[in-house]
Image: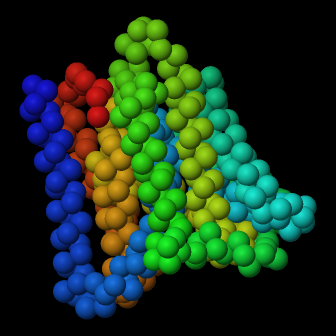
């Protein structure tokens, strides 16, 4: 049974990579400029933040929860860091550090609210998104924050060894650390255990609330990292910078094969899901799809991915199949 389960997971992952290749081939046939080196590099640059945030969302989804506040955290970190560097005249490293601390604290607060008050994660984090956005607009007066040192752009534009963009290095480090956490640490295994069977995990002596709070804290921190990269790209704190990112991130991880009800997913799911959304979004822009059609298509993609996941988890007579293992 365990071997059969591994084969099914491998087939599911292979199907995602085949879907990615199909998108690339189709877009290349429809528009020759899609497959050029410059455009492919543009796609990678556009998916840096999505990939980083998706790693955090993976942690939360593995525990059977969800977080819709990530777009608010991204926006807040950009605005707050910009204000700290300009109005407060702090050195850029100090401003960045404070911004990341705030993002982790927001994640921690999300986890505390969801676990201790038992508010449904969907409602609790959606409410927190509005709270965080409200704070962002309040501290900047609803206007972008300019005046950051041009040297800050180097975070987004500098090259390692003259060929590797720094955001790629940051993304690879986040992916590697995420893989290590899930495969080699007890906390990573606890994420899977809580999402697979929370009650059994609790009875085994594991503090499930602390595990989920840790997942939310990491998610908030990684949303903050994405916010710093966004700030470096546009060189201004934009209160609307994260608008819509929560659905982009959720779609990427679900399309990549992460089970939305918890207990199943891996870093490779984040990679393929982010690439699918990146290539799809870029292709629609090149083909001239207007913004409204893009929103429609992305919504349909999310609906399709969640629907497929739901059907795979549903047994005969509509009963859910029992999850026998929480291993990745």
Which residue lies most toward the right here? Answer: 88
Task: Name the residue rendered at 21%, 50% in the picture.
Answer: 13
In this figure, what is the number of numbered marks?
A: 0
Horizontal side of residue 84 vs 66, given as left or right: right
Q: Which residue lies at the image location 9% right of the left edge and 32% below the top edge?
A: 4
Residue 152 image offset from top left, x and y in percent: 71, 72
Residue displayed at 25% across by 91% down? 32
Name the residue located 37 percent from the left edge and 24 percent from the top edge. 193
Describe the colour scheme in one phrase. rainbow
Residue occupying the far bottom of the picture: 32
Quarter of the picture holding the N terminus: top left
Residue 9, image quadrant: top left
Name the residue nearer the viewer: 65 or 297: 65
Q: Is residue 154 above or below residue 39?
A: above
Specify the quadrant that holds the C terminus: top left
- Report the front residue among 113 and 40: 40
The reply to whether residue 308 is in sight is: yes
Q: Is residue 47 left or right of residue 120?
A: left
Left/right of residue 208 with respect to residue 88 in the rendered view = left
Indicate the position of residue 2 as horizontal and vertical percent values. 13, 27
Residue 76 seen in render? no
């Amino acid at each position: 049974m365990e071997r059969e389960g591994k084969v099914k997971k491998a087939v599911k992952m292979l199907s995602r990579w085949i879907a990615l290749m199909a998108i690339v081939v189709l877009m290349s046939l429809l528009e020759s400029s899609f497959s050029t080196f410059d455009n492919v590099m543009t796609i990678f640059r556009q998916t840096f933040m999505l990939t980083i945030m998706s790693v955090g969302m993976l942690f939360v989804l593995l525990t059977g929860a969800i977080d819709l506040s990530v777009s608010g955290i991204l926006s807040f970190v950009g605005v707050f860091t910009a204000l700290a560097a300009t109005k407060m005249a702090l050195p850029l490293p100090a401003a960045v550090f404070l911004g990341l601390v705030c993002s982790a604290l927001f994640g921690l607060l999300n986890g505390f609210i969801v676990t201790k008050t038992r508010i449904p994660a969907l409602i609790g984090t959606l409410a927190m998104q509005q709270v965080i956005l409200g704070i962002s607009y309040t501290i900047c007066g609803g206007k972008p924050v300019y005046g950051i040192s041009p040297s800050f752009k180097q975070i987004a534009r500098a090259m390692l060894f003259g060929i590797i963009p720094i955001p790629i290095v940051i993304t690879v480090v986040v992916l590697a650390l995420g893989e290590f956490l899930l495969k080699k640490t007890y906390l990573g295994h606890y994420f899977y255990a809580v999402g697979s069977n929370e009650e059994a995990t609790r009875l085994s002596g594991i503090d499930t609330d602390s595990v989920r709070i840790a997942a939310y804290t990491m998610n908030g921190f990684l949303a903050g990292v994405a916010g710093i990269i966004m700030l470096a790209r546009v060189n201004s704190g934009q209160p609307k910078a994260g608008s819509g990112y929560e659905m982009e991130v959720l779609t990427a991880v679900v399309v990549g094969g992460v089970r939305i009800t918890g207990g199943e997913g891996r870093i490779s799911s984040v990679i393929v899901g982010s690439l699918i959304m990146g290539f799809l979004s870029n292709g629609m822009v090149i083909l001239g799809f207007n913004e409204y059609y893009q929103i429609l298509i992305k919504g349909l993609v999310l609906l399709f991915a969640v629907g497929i996941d739901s059907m795979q988890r549903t047994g005969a007579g509509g009963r859910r199949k029992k999850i026998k293992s929480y291993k990745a």
